[in-house]
C-alpha cells in the first residue's frame, strides 16, 4: 500500500491530515505536479483525471479522490470517527463537509486555478471567474464566522472531516490573498484550534 | 419527515431517483426556485445556502446537500446498496460518484449557471467560464465513453449512486446543448439502460 502525494496541493493534504488524526501511517510517493509528472501516460494509467492523491492498495486497485481515500481508512479504522457516529450525525457531517468543499475549498481553489501563473497554459483559465470565486470565498468566510458563534467545530461539537476540508480550503486561500478578516473572531478561534492540532502539520 | 424539492433542478432529482431505487416514499414540498422562494428568509433559516433539496427530520433537523440526504437513507435502509458493499467497494463508488459530480454534473451545471438567462441577475456569471465548462463536459463524455467499454455501470457491475449522478449530470446538459455524440456507443448503451429504469422518471 502507498499513496501518491504532492505536498503543496490541498487535496493530498486533506488525506495526510486525516491519516494523522487516525494515527495511520502509509508510505508516500511524491508525484511532481509542478513538473507535469501527473500528466504523463504512466500516471494517467493510475488516475485518468491526473489528480492527486491516489491510494494504491496491495491488490493493485487505485483509489483516487481524497474523500474516497479518507472513507476507505474510516472503514478500516473507525475510531476516532471523522465522518460521524450514527445515521443522522453521518448525514450532518456529509452536509458540512460538502459545504466546506463547495463553498470554501472550491472557491479558494477556483480563484487560484483561474488566475495563477502556475496554471497558465496547463488548463483553460478565466480571470473573470477567478474573481467571482474570490468574492464568493470572502463572503463565505463571513457566513462561516457567524455559524461558528455557537459551536466548537464545523459540524458540531466534535472534530470531523468537515474541519479538515475547511482548514485546507482556507489555508489554500493564501495563494490568492483570501484571509480570515480581523473581525471574524469565531472563525479565527476555530482556525487557531484546528491549525494547532499536530495533524495540521502533516 | 419531508423533503423540500424543486422538480426542475438536478440535485433534487438525484434524491428522488435514489429514493425510487430504494423503494422509499417521503412527502415532498415544492419550493419555487424560479420564483425566488429559496432566497427568502424563511427558507434561508432551513438552509442558509439557499439550495435544494433539504430533508426535514421529525426532530426538526435539516439535512441539506443531496448526497448527504442519500447517505441518510442508505443508513436507514441499506438494501439495495447504492454506496458500495465493503470498504474497498465503498471507496471505489465514492471515487466514481465524485468524478461524475466534479467532471460531469459540475460542468453541465457550470455551463448553464454561467450562460443562462435564468441565472442572470441571480448570481455573478462568466460566459467565458461557462464556455470552459461546456468544453470540459464534452471532453469528459468522450472519456466516459471509453471507460464504459468494459463494464456495465459507472463504478463497476452494479448500479450505484455514481450512475444517478452521471444521469442527472448528462440530462442537465440538455439546457446548454451538451449531448452524447453519435459515436459514443458505450455511453449511449449505458444511458439507455439507466434512463429506462423506472427510477429515472422520479
Image: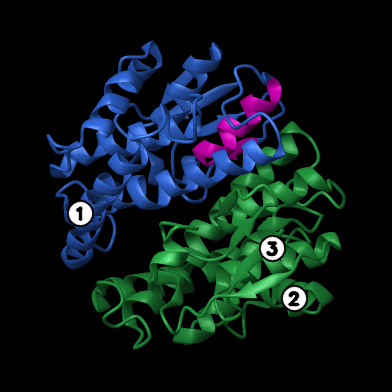
Chain colours: A blue, B green
Residue A64 is a magenta residue = yes
Question: Which residue is denoted by mark 2 in the rendering?
Answer: B200
Which callout, 2 or 3, points at the residue further toward the start of the chain? 3
Vertical comparison of A78 with A115: above or below: above
Give the percent coordinates (x, y) of residue B62. 58, 52
| Mark 3 residue element | strand
**Res A84 visible:** yes
**Rendering quarter of residue B38:** bottom left
Give the percent coordinates (x, y) of residue B194. 76, 72
Q: Is residue B134 left or right of residue B141?
A: left
Q: Are marks 3 and 1 in contact (CB under 8 Å)?
A: no
Residue B87 is a magenta residue = no
Q: Which mark is residue B190?
A: none
Question: Which residue is denoted by mark 3 in the rendering?
Answer: B2
The magenta stretch is A62-76
Q: Residues within 10 Å of mark 2 (few under 14, many from 20)?
A: some
Question: Which residue is denoted by mark 1 in the rendering?
Answer: A134
Q: Are marks 3 and 1 on the same chain?
A: no
| Label 3 – label 1 distance at C-alpha | 35 Å
Identify which residue is drawn at 75% across, 80% down.
B201
Q: Are marks 2 and 3 on the same chain?
A: yes
| Label 2 – label 1 distance at C-alpha | 37 Å
Choose mark 3 or mark 1, whichever is in front.
3
Identify which residue is drawn at 70% across, 57% down.
B161
Q: Is residue B113 left or right of residue B28?
A: left
Q: Residues within 10 Å of mark 3 (few under 14, many from 20)?
A: some
Identify which residue is drawn at 62% across, 86% down.
B182
Q: Residues within 10 Å of mark 1 (few under 14, many from 20)?
A: many
Q: Which chain contains the residue that carries disc 1?
A: A
| Mark 2 residue element | helix
Choose mark 2 or mark 3, whichever is in front.
3
Amino acid at each position: 500500500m502507498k499513496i501518491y502525494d504532492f505536498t503543496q496541493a490541498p487535496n493530498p493534504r486533506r488525506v495526510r491530515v486525516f491519516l494523522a488524526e487516525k494515527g495511520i501511517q502509509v508510505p508516500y510517493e511524491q508525484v511532481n505536479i509542478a513538473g507535469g509528472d501527473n500528466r504523463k501516460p504512466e500516471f494517467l494509467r493510475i488516475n485518468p483525471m491526473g489528480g492527486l492523491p491516489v491510494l494504491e492498495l496491495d491488490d493493485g486497485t487505485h483509489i483516487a479522490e481524497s474523500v474516497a481515500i479518507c472513507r476507505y481508512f474510516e472503514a478500516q479504522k473507525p475510531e476516532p470517527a471523522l465522518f460521524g457516529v450514527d445515521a443522522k450525525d453521518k448525514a450532518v457531517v456529509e452536509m458540512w463537509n460538502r459545504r466546506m468543499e463547495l463553498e470554501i475549498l472550491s472557491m479558494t481553489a477556483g480563484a487560484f486555478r483561474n488566475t495563477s501563473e502556475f496554471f497558465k497554459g496547463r488548463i483553460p483559465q478565466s480571470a473573470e471567474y477567478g474573481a467571482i470565486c474570490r468574492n464568493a470565498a470572502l463572503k463565505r468566510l463571513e457566513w462561516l464566522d457567524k455559524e461558528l458563534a455557537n459551536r466548537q467545530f464545523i459540524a458540531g461539537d466534535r472534530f470531523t472531516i468537515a474541519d479538515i476540508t475547511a482548514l485546507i480550503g482556507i489555508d489554500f486561500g493564501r495563494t490568492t490573498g483570501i484571509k480570515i478578516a480581523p473581525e471574524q473572531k469565531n472563525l479565527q478561534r476555530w482556525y487557531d484550534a484546528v491549525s494547532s492540532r499536530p495533524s495540521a502539520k502533516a
